[in-house]
Image (tube, rainbow, N blue to C red):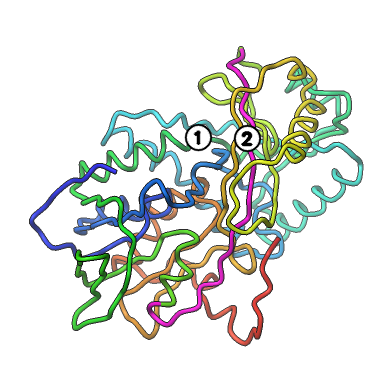
Amino acid sequence: MPQNRTTQQPDTVVIGGGLVGMSIAYGLALIGRRVTVLDEGDDAFRAARGNFGLLWVQGKGYGNAAYARWTREAVALWPQLEALLREDTGIDVHLRQPGGLQLCLSDAEMADEASRLAWLREALDGDYPYQLLDPAELKARVPGIGADVVGACFSPMDGHVNPLKLLRALHVACQKRGVTLVGGVQVDSIDPRAGGFEVRAGDRQWCAERLVLAAGLGNRPLGAMLGMTVPVRPNRGQILVTERLRPFLDYPTTYVRQTDEGTVQLGDSLEDAGFDDRTRSDVLATIAARGVQCFPGLADVRMVRAWGALRVLSADGFPIYEAAQDSPGAFVVSCHSGVTLAAAHALRLAPWIGGLVGDAGIQPFNLARFDGMDEVPYAH
């Protein structure tokens, strides 16, 4: 990772240089904070590697209205974040918000999705637009859809971006705004001290008034250094990428997405595989088969890349936003939707971490919800 050196001591150290950490660092820089980001480097299990690039509201927060509202706000803030990044860097992250499609291959799938969306609409007092599309309505929007698709749920709230260009834009924007980026850092210890924290890695150390743990799966051992239990675990996702094709898909879907470069991503696997981020041929075959069911035109397309990556899931699947009670000035941020929530992290969460605003409606996502659990039931 490139470094931007400064002689000023930071007031905030962010541990983690992925999408979550960099979004928060950028937001802190926007409000004038002096920030240093410590990143493990390319040996880290980067969730961004397996990100599908979706800005997805549809179905998010089923059973948890607070998360549904948070996701809606995050996606509504995305044009503001995109404009800031473009002004700071000139990088086009290819933000597109045409709405998104949840494709269904059976009546049971369609009924299940419709039930979830109805619950969310009621929980949000009707402020949750969506449409249920029958095969004819779906084919009018997406001519290349397969005959096996019985219908789809359409949400005008959804969209997508290029996640790797987003990560690059965040790095460039942070450097432009004075954030110091330090790569190759394996944190050995975190010690509270008068007026803040001391972070050590080998013979190097950093001191700051505030500390943000945004290291994905690394938040569990880092939290333990401050006496906190951060219940996160890996979940593997695998992705296939095709050769470049002529534009044929104007809407992102949960299984198939055409990128700004013309390639097509296929994915949506969920596997409990520990810290194994390798691919498996049987899972990739299932992903490819579903993609061809949805879009038969992909049957003869060449696949050019395949990879696996580890998502960061909390015990209940929802984000963790914690202001440490026993270590004032320390914050924990964990989530599995680093792209969808990036704008909220930069424009809502960072001002909270920086002390400018109250909890910004994120109290339901603190660690207290896991209190009293003898053994934390991890989400699958």
Closest to the observer, 76 or 290: 290
Residue 9's place in the image compared with 130, above or below, is below
Q: Quadrant of residue 303?
A: top right
Foreground label between 2 and 1: 1
The residue sitting at 81% across, 34% down in the picture is 133
Of the 4 image quadrants, the one containing the C terminus is: bottom right
Q: Is residue 336 magenta?
A: no
Q: Which residue is mark 2?
A: 99
The residue sitting at 80% across, 39% down in the picture is 132
- Relative image position of residue 319 (x, y in whole percent): 54, 63
Q: Quadrant of residue 242?
A: top right
Marks 2,1: beta carbons within 8 A: no
Q: Is residue 165 left or right of residue 61?
A: left
Kind of residue indicated by mark 1 = Val
Closest to the observer, 91 or 296: 296
Of the 4 image quadrants, the one containing the N terminus is: top left
- Relative image position of residue 256 (x, y in whole percent): 68, 31
Q: Is residue 241 magenta?
A: yes
The residue sitting at 56% across, 19% down in the picture is 262
Task: Name which of mark 2 and mark 1 comes first in the sequence.
Answer: 2
Residue span colored magenta: 225-245
Residue 265's place in the image compared with 196, above or below, is above
The residue sitting at 45% across, 49% down in the picture is 342
Say which element carries label 2.
loop
- Relative image position of residue 104 (x, y in whole percent): 82, 38
Q: Residues within 10 Å of mark 2 (few under 14, many from 20)?
A: many
- Relative image position of residue 47 (x, y in whole percent): 51, 49
Kind of residue indicated by mark 2 = Gly
Q: Which residue is mark 1?
A: 161
Residue 376's place in the image compared with 45, above or below, is below
Q: Is residue 29 left or right of residue 327?
A: left
Q: Residues within 10 Å of mark 1 (few under 14, many from 20)?
A: many
